[in-house]
Image (cartoon, grey):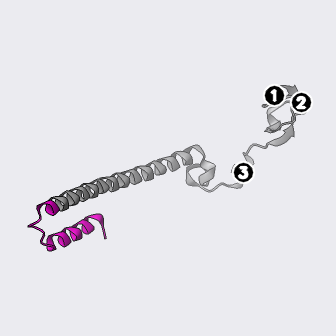
Amino acid sequence: MSARERIAYLRGLIEGQNVADNASMTKFHEALLGALDSIAEELDDIAGSQDDLREYVEDLEDDLMELRSELEPGLTGGHCGHAMSSDDEEDEEEYEATTCPLCGKDFFYRPDAYDEDEDLLCPHCGEPFKG
């Protein structure tokens, strides 16, 4: 039963008590029902705002998913929606893991980005070393 239905039921119970000869009770019941009506109206407003917010979040989520698929096509099955082929997989860059001998931290690098005699540069301590 909704808040408005419960208030209507309560209003019926109060009116059925026939307390018209008791002015203070009538005044109390009117004030109580008025307060409950105000609360029910505020609840309706909150529910409407919540529905609007839910729609907004769903639209935002759709926009983010669309943006993500544009920025990271591999996550959605390749470029422009086509499935990744073995040719696409060959284009992926190869990374290797290494440990900096100076600071002891691990990191990944692309070997094809360095010449054979070129030092690696640790992203943690910033020092060069032979790979």
Residue drawn at the location 81% of the way across and 28% of the way down: 125
Q: CA distance from mark 1 to mark 3?
A: 33 Å
Q: Which residue is mark 3?
A: 89
Q: Is residue 56 magenta?
A: no
| Residue 23 image position (x, y, % from top left) | 11, 61
Q: Residues within 10 Å of mark 2 (few under 14, many from 20)?
A: few
Q: Residues within 10 Å of mark 1 (few under 14, many from 20)?
A: few
Residue drawn at the location 72% of the way across and 45% of the way down: 91
Residue type at numbered disc 2 = Leu
Residue drawn at the location 82% of the way across and 30% of the way down: 122
Q: Is residue 5 magenta?
A: yes
Q: Which mark is residue 125?
A: 1
Q: Which mark is residue 102?
A: 2
Q: Residues within 10 Å of mark 3 (few under 14, many from 20)?
A: few
- Find out whether the residues at labels 1 and 2 contact each other: C-beta distance under 8 Å: yes
Residue nearest the viewer, comparing 1 with 69: 1
Q: Earlier in the sequence, mark 2 or mark 3?
A: 3
Q: CA distance from mark 1 to mark 2?
A: 8 Å
- Find out whether the residues at labels 1 and 3 contact each other: C-beta distance under 8 Å: no
Residue type at numbered disc 3 = Glu
Q: Earlier in the sequence, mark 1 or mark 2?
A: 2
Q: Which mark is residue 40?
A: none
Specify start and end residues of the magenta stretch as a single range: 1-26
Residue type at numbered disc 1 = Cys
